[in-house]
Image (spheres, rainbow, N blue to C red):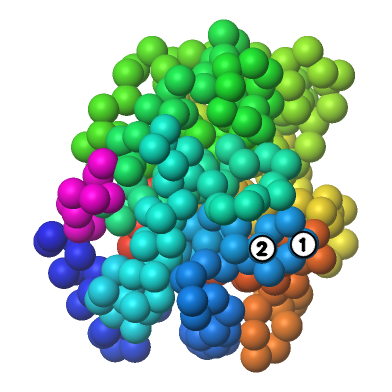
């Protein structure tokens, strides 16, 4: 409850608080406008976000929007976006099946474990702020499903079955488990240890990460940033794997001339900002200003960011989370 009170006070007094280092007035104004635009995208009936193709009312997009509002200092029922967060929380709880799987009704998503992972992370953050018994019960079931879905290699794939695994879905589940553990939900240490082993096996000689253990050694920046964040949240922050991963990541510092994986651009911004924040020091002082400038350059004035594949609310949520990391309101994003 104390965390909720502190966050709520911070949200109401945000205009009087000094801006964090590297967050300038223009960026703060863009954050404020984009939060308002994102709130307007919420479905008035269900409380969900997501309008693009198969991502309509998607639990993952909805959870990411929730994390963006939590990152501004609001909490469910408190702050400028307290009501928005209440509706998000209720929607995700309503989407939780008896077996723990958080998935939107009549979904057409081909990779629902992403949505489940983001939704679990969001509910863990909310439970840590409120200790609401209904959230706890649904969160415990969501965590049990993740644990039961880990395959023999230590990873996860698109569906809640312990068969295949890939680095991207695995990173999403590791972060969800850490958020849940932070909130007081039991997560066996061996589950995290197996996941770390899997992620380490996916690293290539250049420091980047391949998609799956037995795939060709092709490194891609978006999934490499996700892998580094997962290792940090798993408690492997002093590992040589992370150092090599950060070295690879810093070869992709954002800028107008930096080659981009356009389909996963905001996914990359979301994870890379977290990786740089965890690393701190020069990694952060170089990365955040560059990412800030790039995101400000690509923002649609008066609203947010655009993504033709997953949707504008998805892109806006991920960009907002990245830009608001210096405010340090959300526990899973803390160093």
As drawn, 81 above or below 145: below
Q: Quadrant of residue 37?
A: bottom right
As drawn, 290 above or below 10: above
Please, which residue is most extreme toward the top here?
A: 152
The chief SS type of the magenta part is: helix
Q: Is residue 2 left or right of residue 192?
A: left
The residue shown at (26%, 84%) is 12
Q: Are marks 1 and 2 in contact (CB under 8 Å)?
A: yes
Q: Which mark is residue 56?
A: 2
Across and down, in percent, residue 247 comes to 67, 35
The residue shown at (57%, 68%) is 49
Question: Is 164 one of the magenta-colored residues?
Answer: no
Kindly report the distance in space between the C-alpha atoms of the residues bearing marks 1 and 2: 6 Å
Across and down, in percent, residue 246 comes to 62, 37
Across and down, in percent, residue 323 comes to 54, 67
Q: Nearer the viewer, residue 284 or 186?
A: 186
Q: Which residue is mark 1?
A: 53
Q: Nearer the viewer, residue 122 or 277?
A: 122
Query: Is disc 2 surrounded by few (<14), some (14 to 19) or many (20+) residues within 10 Å?
Result: some
As drawn, 82 above or below 159: below
Q: Which mark is residue 245?
A: none
As drawn, 231 above or below 59: above
State which region is magenta.
Answer: 129-137
The residue shown at (42%, 17%) is 191
Question: Is 136 one of the magenta-colored residues?
Answer: yes
Q: Quadrant of the N terminus?
A: bottom left
Query: Is disc 1 surrounded by few (<14), some (14 to 19) or many (20+) residues within 10 Å?
Result: few
Q: Is residue 122 left or right of residue 245?
A: left
Secondary structure of the residue carrying numbered label 1 = helix
Camera sees residue 86:
yes
Q: Nearer the viewer, residue 274 or 136?
A: 136
């Amino acid at each position: 409850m104390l965390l909720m009170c502190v966050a709520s006070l911070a949200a109401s007094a945000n205009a009087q608080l000094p801006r964090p280092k590297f967050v300038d007035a223009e960026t703060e104004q863009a954050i404020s406008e984009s939060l308002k635009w994102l709130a307007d995208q919420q479905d008035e009936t269900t409380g969900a976000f997501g309008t693009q193709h198969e991502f309509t009312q998607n639990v993952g997009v909805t959870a990411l929007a929730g994390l963006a509002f939590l990152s501004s200092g609001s909490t469910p029922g408190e702050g400028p976006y307290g009501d928005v967060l209440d509706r998000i929380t209720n929607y995700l709880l309503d989407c939780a099946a008896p077996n723990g799987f958080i998935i939107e009704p009549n979904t057409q998503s081909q990779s629902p474990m992403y949505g489940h992972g983001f939704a679990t992370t969001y509910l863990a953050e909310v439970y840590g702020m409120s200790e609401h018994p209904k959230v706890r019960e649904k969160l415990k079931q969501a965590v049990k499903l993740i644990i039961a879905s880990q395959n023999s290699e230590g990873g996860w794939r698109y569906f809640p079955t312990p068969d295949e695994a890939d680095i991207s879905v695995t990173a999403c589940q590791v972060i969800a488990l850490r958020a849940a553990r932070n909130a007081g939900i039991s997560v066996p240490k061996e589950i995290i240890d197996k996941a770390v082993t899997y992620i380490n096996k996916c690293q290539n000689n250049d420091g980047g990460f391949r998609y799956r253990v037995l795939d060709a050694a092709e490194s891609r920046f978006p999934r490499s940033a996700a892998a580094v964040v997962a290792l940090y949240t798993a408690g492997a922050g002093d590992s040589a794997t992370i150092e090599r991963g950060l070295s690879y990541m810093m070869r992709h510092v954002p800028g107008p001339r930096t080659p981009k994986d356009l389909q996963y651009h905001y996914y990359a911004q979301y994870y890379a900002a977290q990786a740089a924040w965890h690393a701190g020091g020069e990694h952060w002082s170089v990365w955040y200003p560059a990412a800030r400038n790039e995101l400000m350059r690509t923002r649609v004035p008066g609203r947010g960011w655009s993504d033709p594949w997953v949707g504008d609310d998805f892109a806006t949520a991920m960009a907002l989370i990245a830009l608001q990391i210096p405010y340090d309101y959300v526990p899973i994003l803390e160093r």
